[in-house]
Image (cartoon, coloured by chain):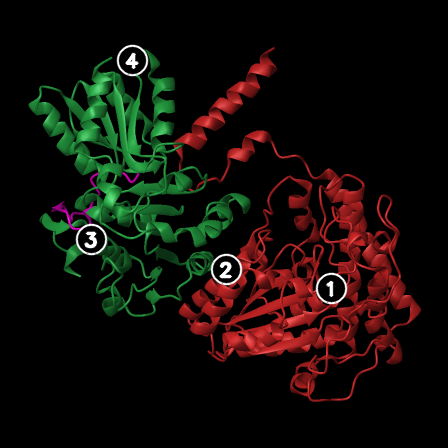
Amino acid sequence: MSASTGAAPQKMTIAKALNAGMRTAMEDDPKVVLLGEDIGKLGGVFRITEGLQKDFGEDRVLDTPLAESGIMGTAVGLALRGYRPVVEIQFDGFVYPAFDQIISQVSKMHYRSLGHLRLPMVIRIPYGGGIGAVEHHSESNEAYFAHTAGLRVVTCSSAEDAYWMMQQAIASDDPVVFYEPKRRYHERGEVELGEDAPHGLHDAVVRAEGTDVTLLAYGPMVKTAMIAAQAAEAEGRSVEVVDLRSLSPLDVPTILASVEKTGRAVVAHEAQTFLGMGAELAALIQHEAFYHLEAPVIRVGGYNIPYPPSRHEEVFLPDLDRVLDAVDRSLAY
Amino acid sequence: MSDDVVAPVENGAPATHEPPARDITDGGPEMVQFLDAEGQRLPLNEANSPYAEYLDDVDDEQLRSLYRDLVLVRRVDAEGHALQRQGELGLWPSLLGQEAAQVGAGRAMRPQDYAFPGYREHGVAWCKGVDPINLLGMFRGVNHGGWDSNENNFHLYTIVIGNQMLHASGYALGVQKDGLVGTGDPERDTAVMAFTGDGGTAQGDYNEALVFASVAHSPVVFFVQNNHWAISEPNEKQFTIPPYQRARGFGLPGVRVDGNDVLASLAVTRAALDRARSGGGPTLIEAFTYRMGAHTTSDDPTKYRIAAEVDVWKKKDPIDRLRKHLDSKGLADQEWLEAIDAEADELALRIRRECQQMPNPPHEEMFDQVYVDHHPLVERERQEFMAYQASFEED
């Protein structure tokens, strides 16, 4: 439990930072309980909850029956009783059995109770592809939840965000869907373990400043975007990378400030583009920054097909080349 | 109230009066019953004897107050039905016929026990002290429920069938974590009840709730009102093994109770709640009853069920039964019965008046309480909406 006590920056993986964030939240608030499949002794299939059951007991880290709707509905009941459940969905593609509970109950409870009831719960979902997995293990289904009023949807791209955003999500009195970039779980980064979070839960953050084009990305695509910005710089193009971090609500001022500066926007995500986050961002930008635009907003994302067999994923997922190609197309206007 | 149920339909085939092909009126020898259809107290038998002690304190006064609850609840329900027919409500789901099941269960609960209803549990709401007027808001379209569930430990109505079963098992898990099971203090030990119908037993959430509660040994009582109809679908479309028998497969005791016998419902629920509160784990109760009315005011049961079936169940009416029982004990003099009816009429009148006076909420309030904390999109749209509305006022 040293994670929360030291003040010096520590180098750790996103996986460890998520673990440390949950640990700190559990130390701070005895009402925080974790629920999920295999999260106890095993520490989850990705080991994100490793050691937490050993340190906090089976009463606070619960291995549940293998039933996602059951986990979600149980978490609702726990939250109604005053607990702060943190639910692990094992893989992105396994959230659908819980979809009904999330949409019909989790998102609406505060509203339908005229504010009498709150569901301070976190739904953790490891998401995205690039790990050579079998079907249903590589999806990016964030738009379903970002589309739903009553939910907050966030995603981290760095160890520092993993650590802090997890604590902020758990502290939120609204339900938060927390997307974890599974192919970046083992990326390392500096984490300031001080008293204050460097950013608000719903702040977008400019990761690289630039002047020619704004590249909007989140979760696993932020690293790709940063590499793209460096590659573009070598060719004399200045790309500003904005890490959205929050998909609902969007940090509209930060997004618009960047696009108004550069006059161009490219959105990159793993999810299929049709009706995805890129569509919403394009609508937002064309409406709010119309007179600043030098080019149409360009989306680069997954093709509008089911997530393909993993032998295709290197061409299905937007990679450095496809992101740079989109940047070039934007700059061509 | 039930007149429209058995009357011939206006634009369909007239109701037939052939006897039902199957006997759905007999709950079988395992069904717990204390009063027969004539209101006579049954002798102890294998089914009811384990529960008899739970009626030891039911004196004349309690019997009378149970009767009062049944009558008032039926009157509330009739008023809801009438208010829908007169355009004051958009919809009303009637509990007609299920009063005893609900009042028995509701009266078995202690104040600290928490109930998760479906949307037909007006009788449970009544017993938990929820003002019936609060039930009307959602059917009038002025809110989605809106009462404070924690005030009476009665959760909002849940419309998606079965969702609430899991909330109950989760809430019960929280009660366990709070250490409020098996302390031996009747004021503190707490149980949770979840209500659904025969149709609800087919839902995944129902089955998952039984699994979760069973595995965690949670203090929850699942109360299935088998009213024999899930809108138009009879029991045989929902299960081949009745709910009380299926419970065993989940690792919890299941008991079938005569849902039209308020004493049986009270005794069996008291036993199950005691067991839950003391750390004995979950129980499933199947209340064998009948939906005398339509599914809701939008439904037309003459299209799918025969009037003879309804006629048979009319003879099992839960209120008639208790009145006969009171009568046999000299507890139902005319003056007292009339006083109850007068109280019911007065209650109905108040509900009618308050329903009609229920204001439409100001439209800008539809943006309230989407989130606990500030959400820029909701706030922005609220402002845009108000500016748009104001643009008409200026003209």
Near-viewer residue (A171 or A246): A246
Judging from the image, what secondary structure is the residue with disc 1 in?
loop
| Amino acid type, residue under disc 4 in the picture | His
Q: Colour of chain A?
A: green
| Amino acid type, residue under disc 1 in the picture | Gln
**Residue A291, image x and y in percent?**
32, 11
In the displayed structure image, the side of residue A128 where residue B154 appears, left or right? right
Which label sits on residue B98? Answer: 1
Disc 4 target residue = A292
Judging from the image, what secondary structure is the residue with disc 2 in?
helix
Mark 2 vs mark 4: give the one in front.
Answer: 4
Please rate how many residues cluster around mark 2, counting C-alpha atoms within 10 Å: few if below 14, some from 14 to 19, many from 20. many
Residue at figure coordinates x 42%, y 51% from the top left:
A96
Which label sits on residue A15? Answer: 3
The chain containing the residue under callout 1 comes to B
As measured in the structure, the alpha-carbon distance from the residue carrying label 4 to the one carrying label 3 is 40 Å
The chain containing the residue under callout 4 comes to A
Which label sits on residue A219? Answer: none
Disc 2 target residue = B167
Proximity of marks 2 and 4: CB atoms separated by less than 8 Å = no
Residue A75 picture quarter: bottom left
Instruction: State how many labels appear.
Output: 4
Q: What's drawn in magenta, residue-wise?
A: A184-203
Proximity of marks 3 and 1: CB atoms separated by less than 8 Å = no
**Residue B204, image x and y in percent?**
52, 60
In the displayed structure image, the side of residue A324 where residue A316 appears, left or right? right
Judging from the image, what secondary structure is the residue with disc 3 in?
helix
Mark 3 vs mark 1: give the one in front.
Answer: 3
